Image (cartoon, rainbow, N blue to C red):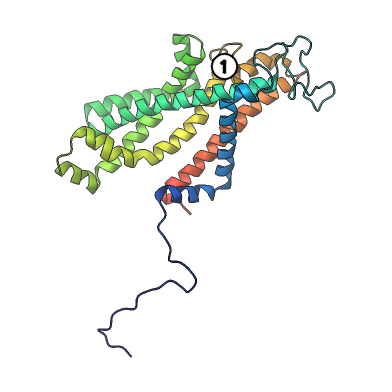
Amino acid sequence: MGSATDPAPIATAPAGKAAPRDLHPIAEVWRDFRANHGAVAGLAVILLFALLAVFADVVAPHPPAEQYRDALLRPPVWLEGGSARFLLGTDDIGRDILSRLIHGARVSMVVGFTVVSLGLVIGVMLGLVAGFFAGVVDMVIMRAMDTLLALPSLLLAIVVVAILGPGLFNAMLAVSIVVLPGFARLTRASVLAELSKDYVTASRMTGARLPRLMFDTVLPNCMAPLIVTSTLGFSTAILDTAALGFLGLGAQPPTPEWGTMLADALQFILRAWWVVTFPGLAILVTVLAFNLMGDGLRDALDPKLKR
């Protein structure tokens, strides 16, 4: 028997097995993300739509605004009267639905990126200022955000577009204002949580100036929830812009935007179901894919939710 002063035995890895290695943070996030099969499926759908958007001019079988007067309301290829020339059929003025859906993916991706970028940049700036400058500045910014949140999102977007005028760009600005309060409030809450931590106190004691504290010290540690919210913001942007297009306040004809396609085809819903069904399915699948991917990112980036 060993004495009390003998050193403790050193744990070794079992024979035939390598010692575990620490994963890079990005590799760890990807490992946790791919464990969620729904999130991986959502990512695959988003990548597919992104590729279609980038190569729409090559992939689409016809120009999106080209009218074929000899093929008005042609049904899809698998129905009687369908043609392989128009796989998903045509609309009431002879435009190929598949081509318009593919080009509509480009419009939707541009809308989502623009809306999220504007809302994220402005919201993060407002949230940082509110978090660092407590008192009157914080109160004014947060009460303004509360006012925007008190209004229904679609109604607020309609009011903004009514003031600016109908059009795709104005619709994107309106939806950016709708998603702005969420980014601002989330950034402020994250900043307030980080300001009480020791590393921020240490940075202050070393003489770090305010811009460095805001952008180099605190903001990088607030990015995880902002990334998740940005992903979910894509679905909100696409859905609200499609709603504005359906009401005639978003993209104007002949722009191949999914909401506008729904509005143009609404009168044919009983005798030509395909002109309404396929744009609606495109919106449904895209929004669902972004929501699934956002849930997976949330689970992967939040330590409290990791399994």
The extreme front residue here reads 58
Q: Which residue is mark 1?
A: 245
Number of marks in the rendered image: 1
Q: Is residue 162 above or below residue 293?
A: above
Q: Write the residue at 70% across / 15% down.
A: 95
Closest to the observer, 158 or 282: 282
Residue 159 visible at all = no
Instruction: Identify the residue shown where x is 80% and y is 28%.
Output: 78
Quarter holding residue 73: top right
Q: Residue at x 17, y 41 (%)?
A: 204
The amino acid pointed to by label 1 is Gly
Residue 26 location (% of width, % of height): 43, 47
- Residue drawn at x 33%, y 23% as measured from the top left: 144
**Residue 149, image x, y percentages:** 41, 26
Indicate whether 91 appears above or below 286. Answer: above
Q: Secondary structure at mark 1?
A: helix
Q: Is residue 184 visible?
A: yes
Q: Residues within 10 Å of mark 1 (few under 14, many from 20)?
A: many
Compared to residue 90, the image places residue 198 above or below, namely below
Query: Looking at this view, is 231 or 131 the one in front?
Result: 231
